[in-house]
Every structure is written in C-alpha cells, then in structure tokens.
Amino acid sequence: QQTQDTTDKRTAILPLSVFQRSLTPPPLNSELLLFVQNSSISTANTKNKMTKEDVKEVKDRLEMEITQLLLDIKRVGKDGEPNVTFGELFVDEQVEQYYEALVGTLKSAKKRKLIDYKGQFLLKGMHDGVVIKIL
C-alpha cells in the first residue's frame, strides 16, 4: 500500500521543467548555435527538427548577447576601459542574470575576433585573473 501511494504521488507531480517547456520557449545560447552550425546531421532525419526560423532566432539571440557582452565588458571594466578580468565579469550581478552561457558567448565573440583572452576555455576560480579585452 505504501509503494502504491508513493508511485501515485510521483506520477501526479511533474517536474517544473515540464511546465516551463510547455509555457515558454527554451533559452537560446551560443552553444546551441555552435551545435547547429557544426552539426553534420541533417535536421530532416531527426525527430527534433529545427526550422529556418529557429536557426534565425538562435543567430539573432547570439548577436544580441555578443553586443551586450561588449557593453558589459566596458561597463564592468575600470573607468570604462575596454577590458575586464573574467572574475570581475563573472560575478557582476547583471551579467549573472543576463547570460545563459557566459563562457559560450565569450567563445563566440572570440571566434569572431571581437574580443581576445588567453586560453580556449575559462573557468571560475581558476581563470579569474585572465584579462578579456575588446579588439
């Protein structure tokens, strides 16, 4: 009897993510765009098809995030200088709230030669002192 009650409770309560998926579109970030651009799998052969509109939406969101990133680097940097350390940028409250994947956005901006920093991948704590500069 206890097992039956527990099972009923588990099936009756859905995870929040199920409700979120039905109410709002998933967040778009630069990692998703990189996957779409580098994917060798045709979307026609997959169950989850991305339409041209979806790809355009991902690209538009990435452009917005990169533009905002450049503004945030200037804002967080000392006296509006076009550089900031990764640690300062990462702990900024507005940056924390805005970016779904800050590191992915940084990588995309670096790939487009809009910013530069040493290394390929930045991790909080280990790379706090790495300077990110606008080119």
Image (spheres, rainbow, N blue to C red):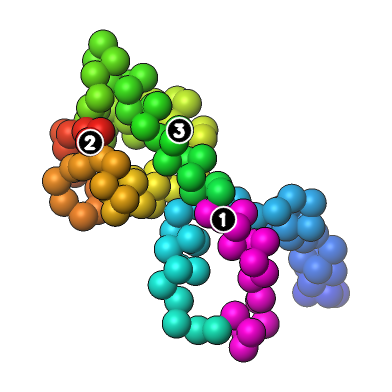
The residue depicted at 49 percent of the width and 61 percent of the height is 32
Q: What residue type is labelled 1?
A: Val
Marking on residue 13: none
Which residue is labeled 1 in the image? Answer: 58
Which residue is labeled 2 in the image? Answer: 135
Residue 84 point in image, percent of width and height: 24, 27
Which residue is labeled 3 in the image? Answer: 68
Q: Which amino acid does label 2 sit on?
A: Leu
Answer whether labels 3 and 1 touch (C-beta < 8 Å). Answer: no
Left or right of 4 on screen, residue 60: left
Disc 1 residue crowd, few under 14, some 14–19, many 20+, Cα 10 Å: many
Residue furthest bottom in the image: 45
| Mark with earlier residue (2, 3) | 3
Residue 80 point in image, percent of width and height: 29, 15
- Residue toward you, 23 or 57: 57
Q: Which mark's residue is nearer the viewer, 2 or 3?
A: 2
| Mark with earlier residue (3, 1) | 1
Q: Quadrant of residue 96?
A: top left
- Residue toward you, 25 or 55: 55
Q: How far apart are marks 3 and 1 (CA)?
A: 15 Å
The residue depicted at 28 percent of the width and 27 percent of the height is 88
Q: Which mark's residue is nearer the viewer, 1 or 2?
A: 2
The residue depicted at 41 percent of the width and 72 percent of the height is 38
Left or right of 33 on screen, residue 109: left
Q: Distance between the residues labelled 1 and 2?
A: 24 Å
Q: For numbered disc 1, what is the local secondary structure?
A: helix
